[in-house]
């Protein structure tokens, strides 16, 4: 973040051939992109999304509308290009990296698969620690390594995606713990739970929260509640911020992972843009706590990075605003008085 460039970009914005603030929120996005890149005329090329995948022991509590094996099956679907994230990424000049940090089952060798399985799924967070602190650190490192690869292969903006049946329960526990909120405020239907399922999910989160002790650090909290992919997501964003690229957030699990990154290193927030607002109720709480305004609100509730990738063309358009002509350059008259 370069504050001098921020001021210079704001000054240029005031000279561009449009009434003041006519491009609304995109104007703020544009000047922030300028500050991140340290140039008054920012430019964004290809994007990357690291879709981190892992399983969750908490599915034993009946907290998802889908069976655990969908995680494994969806990873295969990502590798074959058949998932929503693949189609959206193609439309948005974005490359998809699939990262296995904890999927149950042996995934086949595939050039598109980054293999970094820490363990085959977490323990059941409602009953015991989801993982050890050392496993949490390894999952976070795996996210960092994946981000480094994406950046070395040309990514100019970076998003994370999530795949893991049961992960809206882990995301709820993590965000409730980090924001000091009761389970009711962050637990939602996820893939489509009914009322009874929601009660079980709230109970599972409450039991995890009851094990937390005052004074635990963010990484210890994350090891307690999981999940492995949420830690990897935190790693993706930490690495991206260190590389100085704009970061795009997705829905609830990804934003919970980002919240962890923020607690570990508040500077990541300077680089962050909220791609969208998910239908999952906890997502709003996380974005509000971070002070991020979502660019899109499309009633998505999928994850995988879909909402982040959909916002990438919007970020490129925002960067392009600062390449517009000024009133002086274009010979256009300014306001009457
Ligand atoms: C076919 C399918 C594709 C998905 N892609 C992402 N998710 C999303 O749904 C899951 C979280 O919801 P819950 O906590 O209710 O299990 C995660 O895997 C998330 O990535 C999917 C879910 C399904 C069923
Ligand atoms: O907000 C999300 O990204 C989300 C919502 C439901 C299920 N999976 C992800």
Image: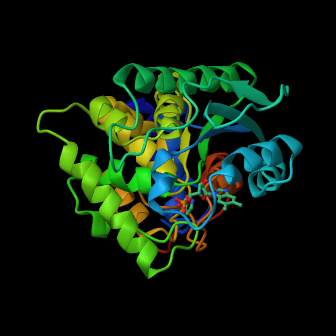
The residue under the point 35% across, 43% down is: 225
Instruction: Residue 306: name its quadrant.
Output: bottom right
Q: Is residue 288 above or below residue 77?
A: below
Looking at the image, which is closer to me, 275 or 313?
A: 275
Res 187 visible: no
Q: Where is residue 256 in the image (x, y as percent from the top left)?
A: 42, 48
Instruction: Residue 22: name its quadrant.
Output: bottom right
Q: Where is residue 32 in the image (x, y as percent from the top left)?
A: 47, 43
Query: What is the basis of the colouring in this image?
Result: rainbow
Question: How many badges with numbers are in the image?
Answer: 0
Res 71 visible: yes
The residue under the point 12% across, 33% down is: 215
Q: Residue furthest left?
A: 214
Left or right of 34 in this view: 47: right
The residue under the point 20% across, 53% down is: 180
Q: In this view, does 86 lie above or below 239?
A: below
Give ligand 2's quarter of the image: bottom right
Q: Is residue 228 above or below residue 114?
A: below
Q: Position of residue 178 (x, y in %)?
A: 26, 46
Q: In this view, does 139 lie above or below 161?
A: above
Quadrant (top left, top right, bottom left, bottom right) of the N terminus: top left
Q: Position of residue 143 (x, y in %)?
A: 56, 27
Quadrant (top left, top right, bottom left, bottom right) of the C terminus: bottom left
Left or right of 208 in this view: 76: right
Instruction: Residue 96: name its quadrant.
Output: top right
């Amino acid at each position: 973040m370069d504050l001098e460039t921020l001021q210079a970009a704001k000054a240029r914005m005031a000279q561009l051939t449009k009434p003041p603030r006519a491009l609304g929120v995109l104007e703020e996005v544009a000047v922030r992109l300028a500050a991140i890149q340290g140039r008054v005329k920012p430019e964004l090329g290809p994007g990357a999304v690291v879709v981190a995948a892992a399983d969750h022991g908490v599915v034993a509590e009946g907290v998802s509308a889908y069976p655990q094996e969908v995680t494994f099956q969806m990873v295969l679907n990502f590798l074959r290009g058949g998932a929503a994230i693949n189609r959206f990424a193609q439309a948005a000049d974005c490359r998809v990296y699939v990262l296995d940090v904890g999927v149950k089952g042996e995934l086949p060798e595939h050039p598109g698969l980054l293999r970094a399985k820490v363990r085959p799924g977490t323990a059941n967070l409602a009953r015991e620690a989801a993982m050890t602190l050392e496993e949490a650190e390894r999952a976070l490192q795996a996210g960092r390594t994946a981000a480094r690869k994406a950046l070395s292969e040309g990514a100019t903006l970076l998003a994370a995606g999530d795949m893991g049946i049961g992960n809206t329960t882990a995301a709820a526990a993590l965000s409730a713990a980090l924001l000091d909120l009761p389970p009711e405020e962050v637990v939602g239907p996820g893939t489509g739970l009914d009322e009874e399922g929601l009660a079980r999910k709230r109970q599972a989160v409450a039991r995890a929260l009851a094990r937390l002790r005052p004074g635990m650090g963010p990484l210890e909290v994350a090891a307690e509640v999981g999940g492995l992919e949420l830690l990897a997501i935190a790693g993706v964003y930490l690495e991206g911020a260190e590389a100085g690229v704009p970061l795009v957030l997705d829905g609830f699990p990804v934003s919970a992972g980002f919240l962890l990154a923020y607690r570990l290193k508040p500077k990541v927030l300077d680089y962050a843009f909220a791609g969208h607002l998910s239908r999952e109720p906890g997502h709003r709480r996380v974005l509000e706590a971070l002070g991020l305004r979502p660019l899109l609100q499309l009633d998505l509730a999928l994850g995988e990075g879909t909402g982040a990738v959909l916002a990438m063309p919007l970020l490129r358009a925002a960067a392009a605003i600062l390449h517009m002509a000024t009133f002086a350059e274009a010979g256009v008259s300014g306001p009457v008085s």
